[in-house]
Amino acid sequence: MIRLTAALFAAATPAVAQIAPLSFEAGKGLPLAAGQWTYVATANGSVASYDSHLALRCDRTTRTVTISRVAGPPAPLTIATDTMTRTLPAGGRVLASDPLLDAIAFSRGRFLVAGGSGG
């Protein structure tokens, strides 16, 4: 459903919380979060993880993608790309056809994530 190969901007740095309101342009000056993407196929889809920062889980059965922090309980996340900013509710589940996923892909995988907990 979605394949990410580029870096994630400052997934857990305190500087993200200081950007008000969160915007992709304002976040361009932030350092990239240390880490790299890994991809694992699962029985019902796949999981792409950015180290201990973020996970994108694709479920073919329900045709959904869940975007969440790796550590901590489910919490709302704000995702900012160069064309769209959206806050997802706790759980972060979107339909596979959601325009947010296109915005992430068209921004060449570079996007900001704020909120939630975890490192």
Image (cartoon, helix red, strand yellow):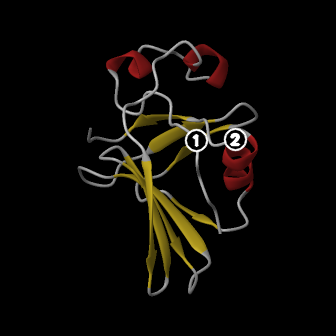
The crowd level at tag 1 (other Cα within 10 Å; few <14, some 14-19, many 20+) is: some
**Residue at horizontal 68%, vertical 50%?**
100
Q: Quadrant of residue 43?
A: bottom left
Residue at 47% of width from left, 52% of height from top?
A: 89
| Disc 2 packing (10 Å; few <14; some 14–19; many ≥20) | some
Q: CA distance from mark 1 to mark 2?
A: 6 Å
Per the image, the residue denoted by label 2 is 108
Q: Residue type at mark 2?
A: Arg
Which of the labelled discs sits on residue 77, or is there none?
none
Of label 1 and label 2, which has the lower sequence position? 1
Q: Is residue 68 left or right of residue 22?
A: left
Please state the horizontal and vertical placement of residue 70, each as a whole percent of the image. 31, 52
Foreground residue among 18 and 89: 18
Which quadrant of the rendered structure holds the C terminus? top left
Q: Point out residue 69 in the picture as x, y percentages from the top left corner.
A: 35, 49
Picture coordinates of residue 78 (x, y %)? 51, 38
Which structural element holds mark 1?
loop
User: Dot 2 lies on which element?
Assistant: loop
Towards the viewer: 86 or 16: 16
**What residue sits 61% from the left and 59% below the top?**
3
> In the image, is residue 51 above or below residue 98?
above
Q: Position of residue 28 (x, y in %)?
A: 59, 18
Is 44 situated above or below 74?
A: below
Residue at x-position 64% and y-position 62%: 2
Callout 1 amino acid:
Ala
Tell me: 37 left or right of 85: left
Q: Are marks 1 and 2 in contact (CB under 8 Å)?
A: yes
Residue that carries the numbered disc 1 in the rendered image: 6
